Amino acid sequence: MNLILFGPPGAGKGTQADFLNKKYGFAKLSTGDMLRAAVAAGSPLGLQAKEIMAKGQLVSDDIMIGLIRARIQEPDCTKGFILDGFPRTVAQAEALDQMLMAEKKRLDHVIELQVNDSELTQRICGRFSCKKCTAGYHDTFKRPLKDGVCDECGSTEFSRREDDNASTVAKRLDAYHAQTAPLLPYYDKENVLISIDGMADIEIVTRQIEEIIGGAGKLAAN
Ligand code: AMP
C-alpha cells in the first residue's frame, strides 16, 4: 500500500502517518523530517535547506526528488510507504510517477486532509514535541497530562520547530496554495484522489483513512 497524505502544513499528515506506520508497518517518508535531520546534522544539504525552510519557501525539486528516489528503494518500503510532505510541486509529482513506474510500484491513494487556513495557523503556532520520543503536543488542544512531562516517555525536554511561527506559517501557506494545491487536479485525473475533512477529531480522521485503505487493515490483522 503506497499512499500520499496530502494537505497544507498543520493538516495532521505527520500524526496520521505516524499512526499508519505503527499500526501497519508502512514506512513514513516525511521530507520535512529528512530535511530537519540534515539541518541538525549540519550536512551540506542541511546548510542549504536551513535558510529556505526558515523563509517558508520550498527546497529545490532536484534535491527533493533525489532524496525520495533513494528512500523508496530502501527495504522498509517493500511493504508500502506513506509520503508526508512530498510531492509539493507538479515537477515532483511527475518525477514520482516516473520513479514508481521504474520500481514497478504504484500509488494506491492520495488522501487530502482539508483544513482551512485560520485553523492551520492556530494549530501550527501552538505545537511542540517531546525531544526524546517526538510525541506531539499543543499549547491549547493537547497539553501533556502533567505539565512539562511527556505522556509517552516521561522526558521533560520539549522543542518547537523554528518555522512554526506566525510569519513563516503565512509564507508556508502561500507556498502551499501557489505550488502544491495545483497537484489536486493532477491526482484527480489519475483517479487516486480522495478528500476528507481534516478539521474533524484526530481519531475520526484516522478512522476515515483506515476505511479508505480497508484492505491494508485486514492484511495487517492476518
Ligand atoms: P514540513 O515538515 O513538511 O512542513 O516541511 C518543512 C519545510 O521543509 C517546508 O516548509 C519546506 O521548506 C521544506 N520541504 C519539505 N518537503 C519539501 C518538498 N517536498 N519540496 C520542497 N520543500 C520541502
Image (cartoon, rainbow, N blue to C red):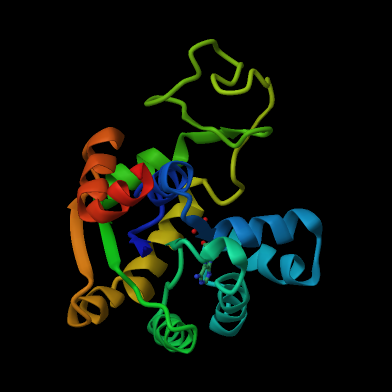
Classify residue 41 by image quadrant.
Answer: bottom right
The quarter of the rendered structure image containing the N terminus is bottom left
- The location of residue 53, given as percent across then percent down, is 59, 62
Q: Can you see residue 84?
A: no
Residue 130, placed above or below residue 17: above
In depth, the one of 69 and 23 nearer the eye is 23
The quarter of the rendered structure image containing the C terminus is top left
Residue 193, placed above or below residue 145: below
Q: Residue at 42% of width from left, 87% of height from top?
A: 101
Residue situated furthest top in the rendering: 146
Q: Can you see residue 1?
A: yes
Horizontal side of 77 relative to 193 (left or right) equals right
In depth, the one of 16 and 119 nearer the eye is 16
Q: Residue at 30% of width from left, 71% of height from top?
A: 181
- The location of residue 209, given as percent across then percent down, is 26, 49
Q: Residue at 57% of width from left, 60% of height from top?
A: 76
Residue 125, placed above or below residue 84: above
Residue 152, placed above or below residue 208: above
- The location of residue 188, given as percent across then percent down, is 19, 76
